Image: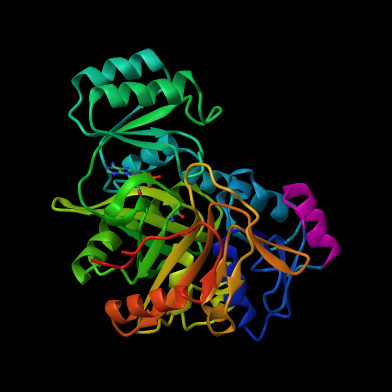
Amino acid sequence: MKLLLIGAGGREHSLAWKLAKSEKVEKIFVAPGNGGTAFADKCENVDITDINELLAFAKENNIDLTIVGPEDPLTKGIVDLFKAGGLKIFGPDKAGAELEGSKSYSKDFMKKYGVKTAEYEVFYDADKALGYLENCTYPIVIKADGLAAGKGVAICETREEANDSIKSFMIDDIFKGAGAKVVIEEFLDGVEASILSITDGKTIVPFLSAKDHKQIFDGGKGPNTGGMGVLAPNPYVTDEVQKEFEENIMAKTLAGIQAEGYDFKGIIFFGLMITKKGTYLLEYNVRMGDPETQSVLYLMESDLLEVIEAAMNEELAGFEIKWSKGTCVNVVLASGGYPGEFVKGYEIKINEGVKDKVFLAGAKAEDGVLKTNGGRVLSVLGVGDTVEEARVDVYNNIDGVEFEEMYFREDIGLI
Ligand code: AMP
Ligand code: GLY
């Protein structure tokens, strides 16, 4: 099969690596790809991001299946476009992608179908939002409605902080439209878990759980990032939590997907908060997580293409995904200064011995040389039978990677 994989992150390098292992896969075009997919087995980068140009490319090159990595093309309706053009594509339609594209839409969906989630109110008007803050209990959570590259959530400890967030989201318009509408939400205290899953619209099959580390500094301090490292499986997802998740969140979500009539053959990612009052859904994503994917796919023993084909053919009922028994930790190596300002263009050196444990993200290939090209540059993986073994492995492997101003957390996987 000839595949077209859309995206440019560490997630896509990891997807490309896993898909290339399938005997059925002959070639993977990655659009636009990155420095990792540029050199990956069976892969070729193509410099296209516009969804109409992607459609034309897929037609011209007789692509058998397109797999969409990031949310952006999904919320723009790439699935509807490809299907109308008679092409096979893995991902939700535009209506289903709104579960990630709009926080107010997804919260209303959760409420409508009884999915356990934090209490919330939606505001279209800054004065009304500011007025509401007078009588809230703090901390409180303020979320820009639209996509804001993972930066649209503010946890506000005081009314002053909340006022400032409302002003910057709604009046100063720092997210260029995405914050014109906001969700103000009850703060939940607990530990987070990411459960990625696959659906064919009739069944949802969860993947192994994962634990992201969102803040930039050790101990969960400092501003939120796209994710600084992941432990999989997530030790906080006990059998009891898993059961609660499947009953109160996953099953109700599936019922909602069916009742709304989405055409949803794709990934649904549940961002959970495990609290003393039970397990809550914080958010949906309609794509795999980054860097969750890097750890989770490393532990997947099944052929990913076969898993995706089962979803495409509506054969997920009774389908079992095989997982390795081990633990995988991935640590993100970032450019110094991220998530603020940072310098790009440093050469990245990776020792031969750790090459198959490195997934590149913000990195490009320039005349055959790998260079830093983003905040989160790459993930290094470590595996073991226990969390401790995997942690030792990953921090050893990091010694095999070098670039200037490299920054990473030392506590990924510590529980
Ligand atoms: P989201 O994009 O909704 O996942 O939010 C980003 C991050 O903000 C989450 O991963 C949590 O760390 C935090 N967060 C979001 N909603 C809440 C909430 N209601 N209570 C506490 N933390 C939250
Ligand atoms: N790592 C969190 C996300 O991909 O949204």
Q: Nearer the viewer, residue 165 or 271?
A: 165
Task: Return the residue nearer the eye: 267 or 202.
Answer: 267
| Quadrant of the image where one finds ligand 1 | top left
Left or right: 248 in relation to 21: left
Left or right: 22 with respect to 55? left
Magenta segment's dominant SS is helix
Q: Is residue 87 magenta?
A: no
| Residue lying furthest right | 60
> Going by the picture, which residue comes out furthest to the left?
276
Position above or below: 209 against 79: below
* Image quarter in which the N terminus is found: bottom right
Residue at horizontal 26%, vertical 48%?
Answer: 116
- Give the number of callouts: 0
Q: Position of residue 125 (x, y in %)?
A: 41, 17
Locate residue 21, reporting x and y percent. Answer: 61, 83
The reply to whether residue 290 is visible in this rendering is: no
Quadrant of the frame with the C terminus? bottom left
> Residue 232, percent across and down?
36, 71
Q: Give the left or right position of residue 105, taking residue 345 as reference.
A: left
Is residue 399 something that shows in the picture?
yes
Residue sitting at x 37%, y 62%: 195
Residue at the image position 42 percent from the left and 63 percent from the top: 196
Image location of residue 322, percent across then percent down: 42, 82
Q: What colour scheme governs how the chains and residues are painted in the rendered image of this protein?
A: rainbow
Is residue 223 or residue 264 the one in the foreground?
223
The residues colored magenta run 47-61
